Amino acid sequence: MAKKRILTGDRPTGPLHLGHYVGSLEERVKLQKETEEFILIADVQALTDNFKTPEKVSSNVRAVALDYLSVGLDPRLVTIVVQSQIPEIAELTVFYLNLVHFGRLLQNPTVKTEIKQKNFGKEIPVGFLAYPISQAADITAFQANLVPVGEDQLPMLELTREIVRKFNRLYGETLVLPKAVISKSPRLVGTDGKEKMSKSLGNAIFLCDSYDELERKVMHMYTDPNRIHPTDPGRVEGNPVFSYLDLFSDKKDEIKELKKRYHAGKVGDVEVKRFLVEELDKFLDPIRRRRKEFENDHKKIDKIIREGTEKGKQVASETLYEVKKSMGINYLF
Ligand code: ATP
Ligand code: MG
Protein backbone atom coordinates (compact mmCIF):
# COMPACT_ATOMS: atom_id res chain seq x y z
CA MET A 1 0.00 0.00 0.00
CA ALA A 2 1.26 3.49 -0.81
CA LYS A 3 2.38 5.60 2.12
CA LYS A 4 0.01 8.34 3.29
CA ARG A 5 1.13 11.78 2.26
CA ILE A 6 1.41 14.58 4.81
CA LEU A 7 1.70 18.31 4.46
CA THR A 8 2.49 20.69 7.30
CA GLY A 9 4.31 23.95 7.53
CA ASP A 10 5.24 27.10 9.36
CA ARG A 11 5.42 30.77 8.57
CA PRO A 12 9.06 31.97 8.64
CA THR A 13 8.26 34.90 10.90
CA GLY A 14 10.62 33.93 13.71
CA PRO A 15 12.19 30.91 15.33
CA LEU A 16 9.94 28.01 16.33
CA HIS A 17 8.74 27.63 19.89
CA LEU A 18 7.41 25.11 22.41
CA GLY A 19 3.87 25.55 20.97
CA HIS A 20 5.10 24.39 17.58
CA TYR A 21 6.77 21.42 19.20
CA VAL A 22 3.73 20.00 20.97
CA GLY A 23 1.26 21.33 18.39
CA SER A 24 2.90 19.94 15.29
CA LEU A 25 6.65 19.17 15.22
CA GLU A 26 6.48 16.22 17.62
CA GLU A 27 3.84 14.56 15.44
CA ARG A 28 5.88 15.24 12.30
CA VAL A 29 8.94 13.54 13.77
CA LYS A 30 6.83 10.57 14.86
CA LEU A 31 5.27 10.15 11.41
CA GLN A 32 8.34 10.73 9.26
CA LYS A 33 9.21 7.05 8.77
CA GLU A 34 5.80 5.66 7.99
CA THR A 35 4.53 8.48 5.76
CA GLU A 36 5.67 10.65 2.86
CA GLU A 37 6.07 14.03 4.47
CA PHE A 38 6.29 17.46 2.86
CA ILE A 39 7.08 20.41 5.11
CA LEU A 40 6.38 23.85 3.76
CA ILE A 41 8.18 27.00 4.80
CA ALA A 42 5.29 29.35 4.07
CA ASP A 43 7.09 32.56 3.16
CA VAL A 44 4.39 33.76 0.74
CA GLN A 45 1.79 33.41 3.48
CA ALA A 46 4.07 35.20 5.94
CA LEU A 47 4.29 38.12 3.52
CA THR A 48 0.53 38.68 3.69
CA ASP A 49 1.00 40.47 7.01
CA ASN A 50 4.72 41.30 6.68
CA PHE A 51 4.83 42.72 3.16
CA LYS A 52 6.37 45.96 4.42
CA THR A 53 9.32 44.06 5.91
CA PRO A 54 10.10 41.19 3.52
CA GLU A 55 13.55 40.81 5.09
CA LYS A 56 11.85 39.67 8.31
CA VAL A 57 10.48 36.75 6.31
CA SER A 58 13.47 35.94 4.12
CA SER A 59 15.90 36.06 7.04
CA ASN A 60 13.89 33.41 8.89
CA VAL A 61 13.69 30.79 6.15
CA ARG A 62 17.01 29.17 7.02
CA ALA A 63 16.31 29.58 10.76
CA VAL A 64 13.09 27.60 10.49
CA ALA A 65 14.84 24.89 8.46
CA LEU A 66 17.49 24.68 11.18
CA ASP A 67 14.73 24.30 13.77
CA TYR A 68 13.36 21.35 11.78
CA LEU A 69 16.72 19.62 11.72
CA SER A 70 17.23 20.37 15.42
CA VAL A 71 14.04 18.65 16.54
CA GLY A 72 15.05 15.54 14.64
CA LEU A 73 13.31 15.82 11.30
CA ASP A 74 15.53 13.85 8.95
CA PRO A 75 15.98 15.31 5.44
CA ARG A 76 16.38 11.78 4.07
CA LEU A 77 12.82 11.05 5.23
CA VAL A 78 11.05 14.41 4.88
CA THR A 79 10.97 16.96 2.07
CA ILE A 80 11.43 20.59 3.11
CA VAL A 81 10.09 23.06 0.53
CA VAL A 82 10.02 26.84 0.24
CA GLN A 83 6.61 28.11 -0.86
CA SER A 84 7.72 31.13 -2.92
CA GLN A 85 9.93 28.96 -5.10
CA ILE A 86 6.97 26.86 -6.26
CA PRO A 87 4.86 29.21 -8.43
CA GLU A 88 2.48 26.30 -9.16
CA ILE A 89 1.02 26.92 -5.69
CA ALA A 90 0.23 30.54 -6.60
CA GLU A 91 -1.40 29.38 -9.81
CA LEU A 92 -3.62 26.90 -7.97
CA THR A 93 -4.57 29.69 -5.57
CA VAL A 94 -5.89 31.77 -8.45
CA PHE A 95 -8.19 28.96 -9.58
CA TYR A 96 -9.43 28.34 -6.04
CA LEU A 97 -10.22 32.02 -5.44
CA ASN A 98 -13.30 31.53 -7.63
CA LEU A 99 -14.59 28.68 -5.48
CA VAL A 100 -14.94 30.68 -2.25
CA HIS A 101 -17.24 33.60 -1.70
CA PHE A 102 -16.18 36.73 0.10
CA GLY A 103 -18.50 36.34 3.12
CA ARG A 104 -17.07 32.90 3.86
CA LEU A 105 -13.58 34.37 4.32
CA LEU A 106 -14.85 36.93 6.82
CA GLN A 107 -16.34 34.18 8.99
CA ASN A 108 -13.03 32.40 9.63
CA PRO A 109 -12.54 32.66 13.43
CA THR A 110 -8.73 32.40 13.30
CA VAL A 111 -8.50 35.10 10.65
CA LYS A 112 -10.88 37.29 12.68
CA THR A 113 -8.69 37.02 15.78
CA GLU A 114 -5.54 37.68 13.77
CA ILE A 115 -7.04 40.75 12.09
CA LYS A 116 -7.62 42.23 15.56
CA GLN A 117 -4.13 41.31 16.74
CA LYS A 118 -2.47 42.84 13.71
CA ASN A 119 -4.27 46.19 13.96
CA PHE A 120 -5.08 46.40 10.27
CA GLY A 121 -8.02 48.68 11.08
CA LYS A 122 -10.05 49.14 7.91
CA GLU A 123 -7.07 48.30 5.69
CA ILE A 124 -7.13 44.52 5.65
CA PRO A 125 -4.92 43.31 2.79
CA VAL A 126 -6.88 41.10 0.39
CA GLY A 127 -3.92 38.72 0.40
CA PHE A 128 -4.23 38.34 4.16
CA LEU A 129 -7.95 37.70 4.10
CA ALA A 130 -7.45 35.12 1.38
CA TYR A 131 -4.48 33.29 2.90
CA PRO A 132 -6.69 30.35 3.91
CA ILE A 133 -7.32 29.83 0.18
CA SER A 134 -3.62 29.77 -0.55
CA GLN A 135 -3.32 27.23 2.25
CA ALA A 136 -5.79 25.03 0.37
CA ALA A 137 -3.42 25.33 -2.59
CA ASP A 138 -0.45 24.33 -0.39
CA ILE A 139 -2.21 21.22 0.85
CA THR A 140 -3.68 20.10 -2.46
CA ALA A 141 -0.55 20.89 -4.48
CA PHE A 142 1.01 17.93 -2.69
CA GLN A 143 -2.24 15.90 -2.73
CA ALA A 144 -1.83 15.43 1.04
CA ASN A 145 -4.10 13.01 2.89
CA LEU A 146 -3.18 14.20 6.37
CA VAL A 147 -2.37 17.60 7.87
CA PRO A 148 -1.08 17.62 11.49
CA VAL A 149 -1.89 21.04 12.92
CA GLY A 150 -2.67 23.07 16.02
CA GLU A 151 -6.23 24.07 16.80
CA ASP A 152 -5.96 27.50 15.14
CA GLN A 153 -5.64 25.74 11.79
CA LEU A 154 -8.88 23.76 11.91
CA PRO A 155 -10.95 26.42 10.10
CA MET A 156 -8.31 26.41 7.33
CA LEU A 157 -8.65 22.65 6.96
CA GLU A 158 -12.43 22.95 6.84
CA LEU A 159 -12.18 25.50 4.03
CA THR A 160 -9.68 23.35 2.16
CA ARG A 161 -12.10 20.43 2.32
CA GLU A 162 -14.89 22.63 0.97
CA ILE A 163 -12.70 23.75 -1.93
CA VAL A 164 -11.69 20.19 -2.74
CA ARG A 165 -15.29 18.96 -2.71
CA LYS A 166 -16.42 21.85 -4.87
CA PHE A 167 -13.57 21.44 -7.34
CA ASN A 168 -14.18 17.70 -7.70
CA ARG A 169 -17.93 18.23 -8.11
CA LEU A 170 -17.51 20.91 -10.77
CA TYR A 171 -14.62 19.53 -12.77
CA GLY A 172 -14.44 15.84 -11.90
CA GLU A 173 -12.56 13.84 -9.26
CA THR A 174 -9.07 15.41 -9.21
CA LEU A 175 -8.02 16.51 -5.73
CA VAL A 176 -7.40 14.40 -2.64
CA LEU A 177 -9.65 15.29 0.33
CA PRO A 178 -7.29 15.97 3.27
CA LYS A 179 -7.92 15.29 6.96
CA ALA A 180 -6.62 17.27 9.94
CA VAL A 181 -4.61 15.41 12.56
CA ILE A 182 -4.95 17.30 15.79
CA SER A 183 -2.20 16.83 18.35
CA LYS A 184 -2.64 15.99 22.02
CA SER A 185 -1.98 19.63 22.94
CA PRO A 186 -3.37 21.66 20.07
CA ARG A 187 -3.07 25.05 21.76
CA LEU A 188 -0.18 25.73 24.11
CA VAL A 189 -0.69 28.88 26.21
CA GLY A 190 1.88 31.68 26.14
CA THR A 191 4.19 32.62 29.01
CA ASP A 192 1.81 35.57 29.58
CA GLY A 193 -1.12 33.21 30.17
CA LYS A 194 -2.74 34.33 26.89
CA GLU A 195 -4.50 31.61 25.00
CA LYS A 196 -1.82 30.84 22.42
CA MET A 197 1.95 30.92 22.42
CA SER A 198 2.87 32.70 19.21
CA LYS A 199 5.95 34.09 17.53
CA SER A 200 4.16 37.37 16.91
CA LEU A 201 2.88 37.94 20.45
CA GLY A 202 6.16 38.05 22.38
CA ASN A 203 5.03 35.25 24.71
CA ALA A 204 7.07 32.36 23.37
CA ILE A 205 9.89 30.15 24.64
CA PHE A 206 11.91 29.34 21.55
CA LEU A 207 13.53 25.99 20.81
CA CYS A 208 16.79 27.90 20.29
CA ASP A 209 16.67 29.82 23.59
CA SER A 210 19.80 29.68 25.74
CA TYR A 211 19.66 28.72 29.41
CA ASP A 212 19.73 32.41 30.40
CA GLU A 213 16.87 33.35 28.07
CA LEU A 214 14.87 30.38 29.25
CA GLU A 215 15.44 31.31 32.88
CA ARG A 216 14.46 34.93 32.33
CA LYS A 217 11.24 34.00 30.53
CA VAL A 218 10.18 31.36 33.04
CA MET A 219 10.90 33.57 36.06
CA HIS A 220 8.65 36.26 34.51
CA MET A 221 5.87 33.84 33.66
CA TYR A 222 2.27 34.49 34.47
CA THR A 223 0.96 32.12 37.16
CA ASP A 224 -2.08 32.65 39.35
CA PRO A 225 -2.80 36.41 39.48
CA ASN A 226 -4.78 36.07 42.72
CA ARG A 227 -1.90 34.59 44.62
CA ILE A 228 0.12 37.23 46.44
CA HIS A 229 1.97 35.25 49.14
CA PRO A 230 3.42 31.76 48.85
CA THR A 231 1.09 30.78 51.68
CA ASP A 232 -2.02 31.65 49.63
CA PRO A 233 -3.66 28.59 48.07
CA GLY A 234 -2.78 28.62 44.35
CA ARG A 235 -4.65 27.61 41.22
CA VAL A 236 -3.12 24.72 39.28
CA GLU A 237 -5.64 24.37 36.42
CA GLY A 238 -4.99 26.86 33.67
CA ASN A 239 -1.71 27.88 35.29
CA PRO A 240 0.81 27.85 32.41
CA VAL A 241 3.69 26.83 34.69
CA PHE A 242 1.93 23.56 35.45
CA SER A 243 0.71 23.14 31.86
CA TYR A 244 4.33 23.26 30.70
CA LEU A 245 5.45 20.86 33.43
CA ASP A 246 2.76 18.37 32.40
CA LEU A 247 3.91 18.48 28.80
CA PHE A 248 7.67 18.78 28.99
CA SER A 249 8.72 16.94 32.14
CA ASP A 250 8.45 13.24 32.84
CA LYS A 251 8.88 13.61 36.61
CA LYS A 252 5.19 12.85 37.10
CA ASP A 253 5.37 12.06 40.84
CA GLU A 254 7.28 15.23 41.71
CA ILE A 255 4.83 17.29 39.66
CA LYS A 256 1.87 15.71 41.46
CA GLU A 257 3.47 16.55 44.80
CA LEU A 258 4.22 20.13 43.71
CA LYS A 259 0.65 20.63 42.55
CA LYS A 260 -0.63 19.45 45.92
CA ARG A 261 1.68 21.81 47.79
CA TYR A 262 0.83 24.70 45.45
CA HIS A 263 -2.85 24.15 45.94
CA ALA A 264 -2.39 24.08 49.71
CA GLY A 265 -0.24 27.23 49.77
CA LYS A 266 2.87 25.32 50.79
CA VAL A 267 5.24 26.26 48.00
CA GLY A 268 6.17 29.57 46.42
CA ASP A 269 6.04 30.45 42.71
CA VAL A 270 9.81 30.85 42.65
CA GLU A 271 10.47 27.23 43.64
CA VAL A 272 8.01 25.88 41.06
CA LYS A 273 9.47 28.11 38.36
CA ARG A 274 13.03 27.03 39.25
CA PHE A 275 11.94 23.43 38.81
CA LEU A 276 10.36 24.29 35.44
CA VAL A 277 13.56 26.01 34.24
CA GLU A 278 15.55 22.83 34.92
CA GLU A 279 12.98 20.54 33.32
CA LEU A 280 12.66 22.70 30.19
CA ASP A 281 16.43 22.95 29.98
CA LYS A 282 16.63 19.16 29.96
CA PHE A 283 13.98 19.00 27.26
CA LEU A 284 15.81 21.55 25.09
CA ASP A 285 19.22 19.99 25.51
CA PRO A 286 19.11 17.32 22.77
CA ILE A 287 17.55 19.91 20.44
CA ARG A 288 20.46 22.28 21.13
CA ARG A 289 22.96 19.48 20.54
CA ARG A 290 21.50 18.62 17.12
CA ARG A 291 21.40 22.34 16.28
CA LYS A 292 25.15 22.56 16.86
CA GLU A 293 25.75 19.90 14.20
CA PHE A 294 24.12 22.03 11.51
CA GLU A 295 24.15 25.67 12.57
CA ASN A 296 27.44 26.70 11.04
CA ASP A 297 26.99 24.70 7.88
CA HIS A 298 24.78 27.06 5.87
CA LYS A 299 25.72 25.31 2.65
CA LYS A 300 24.36 22.03 3.93
CA ILE A 301 21.09 23.62 5.10
CA ASP A 302 20.67 25.41 1.76
CA LYS A 303 21.31 22.18 -0.13
CA ILE A 304 18.62 20.40 1.90
CA ILE A 305 16.13 23.18 1.19
CA ARG A 306 17.05 23.40 -2.49
CA GLU A 307 16.76 19.67 -3.14
CA GLY A 308 13.50 19.47 -1.18
CA THR A 309 12.01 22.39 -3.08
CA GLU A 310 12.97 20.85 -6.44
CA LYS A 311 11.22 17.63 -5.48
CA GLY A 312 8.19 19.56 -4.20
CA LYS A 313 8.00 21.57 -7.40
CA GLN A 314 7.85 18.37 -9.40
CA VAL A 315 4.88 17.07 -7.39
CA ALA A 316 3.07 20.45 -7.48
CA SER A 317 3.46 20.73 -11.24
CA GLU A 318 1.94 17.27 -11.71
CA THR A 319 -1.06 18.40 -9.65
CA LEU A 320 -1.36 21.64 -11.60
CA TYR A 321 -1.29 19.65 -14.84
CA GLU A 322 -4.20 17.48 -13.63
CA VAL A 323 -6.11 20.52 -12.36
CA LYS A 324 -5.84 22.31 -15.70
CA LYS A 325 -6.75 19.16 -17.56
CA SER A 326 -9.89 18.72 -15.43
CA MET A 327 -10.87 22.34 -16.02
CA GLY A 328 -10.22 21.98 -19.72
CA ILE A 329 -7.73 24.82 -19.87
CA ASN A 330 -4.75 22.78 -21.02
CA TYR A 331 -4.80 24.40 -24.45
CA LEU A 332 -1.30 24.28 -25.81
CA PHE A 333 0.91 22.16 -23.58
P1 ATP B 1 2.68 33.69 13.64
O1 ATP B 1 2.51 34.44 14.92
O2 ATP B 1 3.65 34.29 12.69
O3 ATP B 1 1.38 33.30 13.00
P2 ATP B 1 2.74 31.15 14.97
O4 ATP B 1 3.50 31.12 16.24
O5 ATP B 1 1.23 31.25 15.02
O6 ATP B 1 3.36 32.32 14.09
P3 ATP B 1 2.60 29.44 12.65
O7 ATP B 1 3.81 29.37 11.76
O8 ATP B 1 1.44 30.29 12.25
O9 ATP B 1 3.11 29.88 14.12
O10 ATP B 1 2.05 27.97 12.95
C1 ATP B 1 2.65 26.79 12.48
C2 ATP B 1 2.01 25.54 13.05
O11 ATP B 1 2.21 25.46 14.46
C3 ATP B 1 0.48 25.47 12.87
O12 ATP B 1 0.13 24.12 12.61
C4 ATP B 1 -0.05 25.90 14.19
O13 ATP B 1 -1.32 25.32 14.44
C5 ATP B 1 0.98 25.34 15.15
N1 ATP B 1 1.05 26.18 16.37
C6 ATP B 1 1.50 27.46 16.43
N2 ATP B 1 1.41 27.94 17.68
C7 ATP B 1 0.91 26.92 18.45
C8 ATP B 1 0.58 26.78 19.83
N3 ATP B 1 0.76 27.76 20.70
N4 ATP B 1 0.10 25.58 20.28
C9 ATP B 1 -0.08 24.56 19.42
N5 ATP B 1 0.20 24.63 18.08
C10 ATP B 1 0.68 25.79 17.60
MG1 MG C 1 0.05 31.60 13.10
Image (spheres, helix red, strand yellow):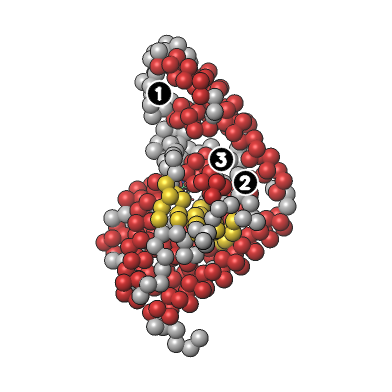
Query: Depth-wise, is mark 3 or mark 2 nearer the camera?
Result: 2
Q: Position of residue 296 (x, y in %)?
A: 73, 49
Q: Which residue is mark 3?
A: 206
- Residue 96 is at least partly visible in this image: yes
Q: Residues within 10 Å of mark 3 (few under 14, many from 20)?
A: many
Q: Position of residue 109 (x, y in %)?
A: 32, 50
Secondary structure of residue under mark 1: loop
**Of residues 269 and 76, the one drawn nearer to the viewer in this rendering:** 76
Let me know if residue 59 appears in the view.
no
Residue bearing mark 1: 236
Image position, residue 261 (x, y; %)? 45, 14
First reached walking from the N terminus: tag 2 or tag 1: 2
Cα distance between the residues tagged 1 and 3: 24 Å
Tell me the kind of residue under disc 1: Val
Which residue appears at 32% of the width and 68% of the height?
166
Q: CA distance from mark 2 to mark 1?
A: 32 Å
Q: Residue furthest left?
A: 103
Q: Amino acid at mark 2?
A: Gly
